[in-house]
Image (spheres, rainbow, N blue to C red):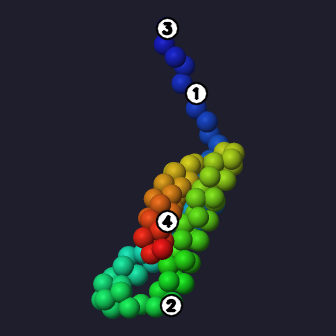
Amino acid sequence: MARKRMYSFAEKKHSQRGLVSTILGGVSLVIFLALAYLAYYLDGQGGAYMGSIGLMGAVFSVMGVILGLVSFREQDTLFLFSKIGTILSGCMMAIWIFVILIGI
């Protein structure tokens, strides 16, 4: 017996929180790459400014994970950006934790 196909004509939009989560994860990645390049270029003599920018990147990744997970509760939305943002921000959060623990 063949299954009937169900069609839905409701237009689903992307989750706004998921999009913000993806943006925060991307910003955290860009900050990490820029600081890694600067640390290599300055031979590790970046100082407190680079540390504070790195801490800001870690906060961005944590907020990206939180917003990505909260965005899965929204109804009638597409979850592509929610998935991308949560995974990207989670990976960046793990990298930032690793970098912070190496520095201690």
Instruction: State the image coordinates of residue 37 (x, y, percent, origin top left).
Output: 33, 82
In space, the residues marked 4 and 1 are separated at their CA atoms by: 45 Å
Q: Which label's residue is closer to the chain start, 4 or 3?
A: 3
Q: Mark 3 highlights which residue?
A: 1
How many marks are shown on the rendered structure? Answer: 4
Structural crowding at the residue carrying mark 2, measured as other residues with C-alpha within 10 Å and reported as few (<14), some (14–19) or many (≥20)? few
Q: Which label's residue is closer to the chain start, 1 or 3?
A: 3
Q: Which label's residue is closer to the chain start, 2 or 3?
A: 3
Residue nearest the observer in this picture, 82 or 64: 64
Say whether marks 4 and 3 touch (CB < 8 Å).
no
Q: Residue at x 48, y 74 (%)?
A: 104
Say whether marks 2 and 1 touch (CB < 8 Å).
no
In space, the residues marked 1 and 3 are separated at their CA atoms by: 16 Å
Instruction: State the image coordinates of residue 56 (x, y, percent, origin top left).
Output: 56, 78
Q: Mark 2 highlights which residue?
A: 49
Q: Which label's residue is closer to the chain start, 2 or 1?
A: 1
Q: Mark 4 highlights which residue?
A: 97
Q: Of tags 2 and 1, which is closer to the observer? A: 2
Say whether marks 1 and 3 touch (CB < 8 Å).
no
Q: Of tags 2 and 3, which is closer to the observer? A: 2
Q: Mark 1 highlights which residue?
A: 6
Structural crowding at the residue carrying mark 4, measured as other residues with C-alpha within 10 Å and reported as few (<14), some (14–19) or many (≥20)? some
Q: Residue at x 51, y 58 (%)?
A: 90
In space, the residues marked 2 and 1 are separated at their CA atoms by: 56 Å
Q: Residue at x 59, y 71 (%)?
A: 59
What amino acid is at disc 3? Met
Q: Is residue 40 above or below residue 5?
A: below
In space, the residues marked 4 and 3 are separated at their CA atoms by: 53 Å
What amino acid is at disc 2? Tyr
Task: Describe residue 28's horizontal placement relative to residue 44 as left or right.
Answer: right
What amino acid is at disc 4? Ile
**Residue 74 visible in image:** yes
